[in-house]
Amino acid sequence: MNLLGRQLLRPAVAAAYRHGDRARLPVLMYHRVLERADPLQPGLIHAAQADAQFKVLSDLFTVLPLHEAADLLKQGRLPPRAISLTFDDGYRDNHDVAMPLLKRHGITATFYIATGFIDGGRMFHDSVIEGVRRLPSGQFALQGLGLPAFTISDDPSRRAAIGDIVKAIKYLEPAQRQTVCDELARAAGNNLPRDLMMTSDELAAMARSGMCIGGHTVQHPILQSVDEAVARDEIVANRAALTTIVGHPPRTFAYPNGKPRKDYSTSHVRMLREAGYEAAVSTAVGVSDRHADVFQLPRFVITESTYSTILFRLLRMSSVLTNDYTC
Ligand SMILES: [Zn+2]
């Protein structure tokens, strides 16, 4: 899009995302930013797409850390065209790929870290993806899940197997999930990667570079699916670990999986307040206004990768106001 086109779109963005007490806050949700596209993970963005998105955001929006945006939203003092970027889980490509791009565009983001997986760990869905990626072609059956045997041949069949297995184990207890992942790893030759997540040193370097670090529990349990005492321990231990690594306590939190009512409840919101958090993000889809509960800010994902489609998506989302839920 040429310079004139961008200048013409500026008023449209300003009208959609006003300031002060009529402001709406979009919060973008990212996970991994791959170096290049992966046929087994078509939903993930790669560096060129992220570069295009960050370009639009730095051109037309005021990018704020989540804690600052939440505070200004609550006070009715959000600047015009405010937006926040968030990255969940703590992937190493956030350090290697996303951070250099963010810096190039002069913007910052908040990174939510599940501390149980940094320094060589692997999240369960990555064990599924990387296990299925390495399965030899042929028939493959997992014990005890009630799933039919998979026929593994090409990328579409591997994608289908990944989707079915993740769906079948997502809400299991972490130990049960691990049993399935171990079985899959054995079938795949026990050589799954151990470098998908950041190290503590990389995390500390991100914080020193001006990126914000937020809480996301230790083992990434869906809080509703574990006892209250376990949920509290997960929140508190994660916060303590991040404080040690980064040198100061995290200010905001992202609920694992994050669906209001289904994945967390008001008692978890209370636990966050008691732990010292100032705001939190969910995975409800939409934007917030000043009446939002800053402990349940909705977010959305953008997958578009051209200047105009990214911008139109952001404009369209400005009307999806998602304040009205009680968990
Ligand atoms: Zn997560």
Image (cartoon, helix red, strand yellow):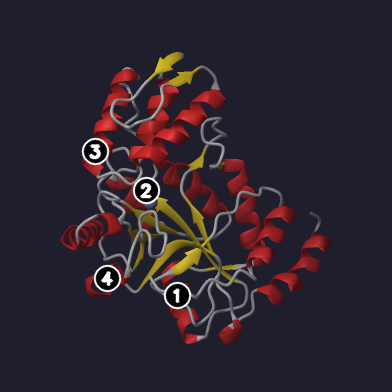
User: Does residue 295 appear left or right of residue 35 in this picture?
Assistant: left
Residue where numbered disc 3 is placed? 176
User: Does residue 50 appear left or right of residue 225 in this picture?
Assistant: right
User: Residue flagged by tag 2: what amino acid is it?
Assistant: Gly
For marks 1 and 3 on the same chain, the one whose residue lies earlier in the sequence: 1
Report the Cα–Cα distance between label 2 and label 3: 23 Å
User: Residue flagged by tag 4: what amino acid is it?
Assistant: Ser
Dots 4 and 2: beta carbons under 8 Å?
Answer: no
Residue where numbered disc 4 is placed? 267
Residue where numbered disc 1 is placed? 70
User: Residue flagged by tag 3: what amino acid is it?
Assistant: Gln
Ligand 1 contact, mark 1 (Cβ < 8 Å): no
Query: In what element is the residue under mark 2?
Result: loop
Look at the image and tell me in which quarter the N terminus lies: bottom right
Report the Cα–Cα distance between label 1 and label 3: 37 Å
For marks 3 and 4 on the same chain, the one whose residue lies earlier in the sequence: 3
For marks 1 and 4 on the same chain, the one whose residue lies earlier in the sequence: 1
On residue 90, the disc is 2
Residue 65 location, x and y as percent? 46, 67
Q: How many marks?
A: 4
Mark 4, Cα crowd under 10 Å, few <14 / some 14-19 / many 20+, is some
User: Does residue 272 appear left or right of residue 110 in this picture?
Assistant: left
Of circles 1 and 3, the one toward us is 3
Residue 224 location, x and y as percent? 29, 59
Is 283 above or below relative to 219? Answer: below
Q: Nearer the viewer, residue 188 or 103?
A: 188
